[in-house]
Amino acid sequence: MTASTARVAFVTGASSGIGAAVALELARRGFDLVLAARRLERLREVARAAHGLGRRALEVGCDVTRDGDLEAAVELGRVDVVVANAGFGVASPLRKLSLDDYRRQLETNVFGVLRTVYATLDDLAASRGCLAIIGSVSGFVALPGTSPYSMSKAAVHALAGSLWYELAPLGISVTLVAPGFVDSDIRRVDNHGALHPDAREPIPGWLRMRTDVAASKIVTATLKRRRELVFTFHGKLGVALARHTPGLLAFLVRRFGIRSRREPRVPQL
C-alpha cells in the first residue's frame, strides 16, 4: 500500500453489510482500501471485489475490542478516509441482561470506535482527511428491548459531536452516520456477537434500504464533509419525532411498540 500515491480508505467491520458496501463504494470512487474485521475469509471476498474494480485492497484481521490491533492495522502509510463501522447489537429486555452484556456492547460499539479514532488520528491529520462514525437511528430513538444498543449508539453520537469541533483545527472532518433499517447481518448476530446466517430477518423488505444505496449515501456525505447523515425515510421520521415531538413518539412506541417473537432478538435500526 505504501508504494501507491492513491487515496486510501480504512474501514472497520468491512467483512459484510454496510462496512463491505462502503468499502466497495470507496473503491469505485478511486480509493485503495485497508479492510479490517475479524472474519478474514469474508474480507478476502471484499478485497477480490475491490481488485475487480481496479483498486488495491489489503485485508487485516482485526478485533476492535483488543488494544493494539488497530494500531497494527494502520501502520501502512497514508490514510485519507476512516470509516469506524465495526459493531453489533445486544438486544433483550433489561431483566434478561447482565452487566456483562452491557460491557460487551460498549466495548465493541463505543471503545472500538475510540480505538479506531486514536489509531488513525495522526494519519488523518497528516492528510486532512475524513472520519465517518457509523451510529444509528437507535441513538436518537431508544425502543423497548434495545437499551444496550441504543446506549452505545447515543454514546458515539456524543463522541462525533465533540470531535467535530475538536478535530476541525487539524483539518479533519467528522461525519456522524445514523442509518435506519438497512440490509445487513446485524439482526442475525446474537448477543455474544456470533453470526447466525440462517436466522430469520425480522424487518420486512419494504422497510429496509439496499446496502449499496446506503453505502453511496454514506460515502457521499463523508467526502462532502457533512456533519450528520440520517436515513432512511422512517429513520428521518423517528429522529424528527424524537427531537421535536417526544411525547408523540412515546405514545406511538407504547401503542405500537416493537416486540420480538423470538427472544432475545429485537429488530434494530
Image (cartoon, rainbow, N blue to C red):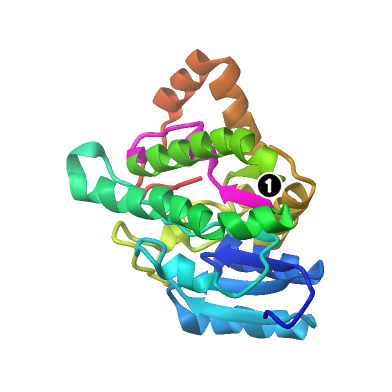
Residue sitting at 29 percent across and 53 percent down?
104
Q: Amino acid at mark 1?
A: Ile
Q: Is-magenta flag for residue 143?
A: yes
Residue sitting at 35 percent across and 63 percent down?
67
Residue denoted by label 1? 172
| 23 horizontally vs 88: left or right | right
Quadrant for the N terminus, please: bottom right
Please identify the quarter of the rendering in which residue 122 is found. Answer: bottom right
Is residue 79 visible from the viewing direction of this image?
yes
Residue sitting at 54 percent across and 57 percent down?
85
- Residue 15: horizontal and vertical position, in percent? 53, 72
Please identify the quarter of the rendering in which residue 177 is found. Answer: top right
Please identify the quarter of the rendering in which residue 232 is found. Answer: top right
- Residue 166: horizontal and vertical position, in percent? 59, 36
Q: Nearer the viewer, residue 159 or 238?
A: 159
Q: Which range is magenta?
A: 130-147
